[in-house]
Amino acid sequence: KDGSRFPAVVSVTALRDDQDSIIGYLLIGTDNTARKQVEAERARLDLVLQNKNAELERARRVAEHANQAKSDFLSSMSHELRSPLNAILGFAQLLESGTPPPSPAQVGSIGQILTAGWYLLKLINEILDLALIESGRLSLSLEPTSLHDVLQDCQAMIAPQAQQKGIAIKFSPVDDDCFVNADRTRLKQVVVNLLSNAIKYNRPGGTAEVSYKLHSNGRLRISVRDSGEGLTAAKMAQLFQPFNRLGQETGAEEGTGIGLVVSRRLVELMDGEIGVTSTVGVGSVFWFELDAASVPQLAQDMQVPFTSPSPPESPDTRVHTLLYVEDNKANMALVVQLVARRPDLRLMGAEDAMRGIAMARAHQPDVIVMDINLPGISGMQALAILRESPATRHIPVLALSANAMPRDIERGLAAGFFRYLTKPIRVNEFMAALDEGLAMTQTRIQ
C-alpha cells in the first residue's frame, strides 16, 4: 500500500471444473525478503570462509618454508661447528696417544681440551635433537625392543662415569622376554640421560638404581632412583624447561639443561609418559612409561643358520691404498697423522670431488673416504659417478662429514656409502670403519 517493492515468490495454479475445463487461476504470492537475506548471508559467509581458507593456506606455506629454512640452518650450523671441532678433538687425541707420550702437565692440558671438546659436541647434539623434535622432523622407528639388551648397553655406557664419581650403580634383573614398543636408539638415549643425571647430582659415595615394573594396563615403567639431595616442590615445577639447570649453573658439574627436555619429548614421541617423585634429603626417582610389547616371533620358514667362528687369518702384509677426498686442510692433516700410525695403509689425498674421481680411476684405491661438502660437485654426486663407472663401482666408499643430521645420515647410507661417520672423528670408530672397508675389498678379491 505504501508503494515499496519487495522480492516475492509467486505460484500460479489453474482451477478446473468437473469436465477438466479451466475456469480460473489461483495466484499465491509469498514475501521472499527473508529467504533472500539468508542467501545473501550464506554467500557472504562462503566468501569469508574462502578468504580464511586462503589465509590458512598462505600461513601453512609460510610455516613450511620457515621449518625448511630452520632445518637447512641447523644442518649448516652443525657442519660449521663440527668442522673446527673435528680438528680440535682429533689432534688432541693424537697428542694424548702420541710417541713419545706427553708429560704429566701436558696430559692434564690435553685432558681439559678433550673434556671441553666432547662437552661442546654433546651440547651441539642436544640442541639439534631439540630443534628437530620441535620442528617435527625427527623420525622414530617404533618396534618391539628388548629391555634386557637396552639396559645392558646402558650399563656398559654409563659404568665409566659412575666409577669416576664413586657412585654404585645397580640394575635390577630383567627377563629376556621383556619387550617395549620403542625406538631402540632413542630409548637408550633417555635411560642414559636419566642415569647421567643420577650420577652427577648424587651425594659422594651414593647409589643409583634402575628398575622396571609391568602394570596391568599393559604399560611398562622404567625407574631411575638416586640418593641425592632431592628436589623441592619449587624446583620440581621448573623441571623439563630448556636450559634451566635449577641453580646448578655455577656448580662443578657440567650440564646443558637440555637433556631432560629432550628425554621428555622423546618419551612422548614414543607414546609414553615421564615424571618424577622426590624427597628432600632422601633422593629422587625419575620414571617413564611405555607400552609393553610381545616377544617378536620368527617366521616359521625362517632358518637361523649357525656359524662357527672363523679361524684367525695370517697377518696380511700387503699395503692398502686409502684415498681421502677432503677440502679442509686441518681435517686432511689429521687423517694423514692417523694413517701414519698404520703401516698397512698408504694415503692419497684429493681436494675436490672431480680430482678424487680421476685418482680413483687411475690408482684403484682399496677404500675411499669422502667428505660431503666439497667445492664443485658434492660427495653425494661424486659417489653416484663412482657407482656408474665399471672401473670404480666396486670400491667401498666411507662418508666422513660434518653433516650430522639424522636425515643426512639416512640419505648418505641410502645413496650407497657403506658407513657414514660424522665429525669430529672418533679415532677408534674411524679405524674400525677403515678395517670394515678393507675387509669388503678383500672379500671381493677372493
Image (cartoon, rainbow, N blue to C red):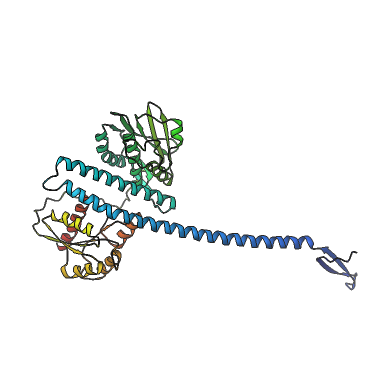
Looking at the image, residue 7 sits to the left or right of residue 317; the answer is: right
Quadrant location, the N terminus:
bottom right
Residue 415 locus on image (x, y percent): 30, 62
Res 190 visible: yes
Looking at the image, residue 165 sits to the left or right of residue 311; the answer is: right
Of the pair 446 and 347, the residue shown nearer to us: 347
Furthest toward the front, the residue is: 105
The number of callouts visible is: 0
Quadrant location, the C terminus:
bottom left
Furthest toward the top, the residue is: 281
**Residue found 42% across the figure and 56% down from its top:** 70
**Residue found 30% across the figure and 44% down from its top:** 119
Of the pair 425 and 271, the residue shown nearer to us: 425
**Residue found 46% across the figure and 60% down from its top:** 65
Residue 437 locus on image (x, y percent): 20, 58
Res 423 visible: no
Relative to 93, say whether 208 is above or below.
above
Of the pair 18 and 357, the residue shown nearer to us: 357
Instruction: Give the quadrant of residue 232.
Output: top left
Residue 284 locus on image (x, y percent): 38, 31
Instruction: Give the quadrant of residue 224.
Output: top left
Residue 400 locus on image (x, y percent): 26, 57
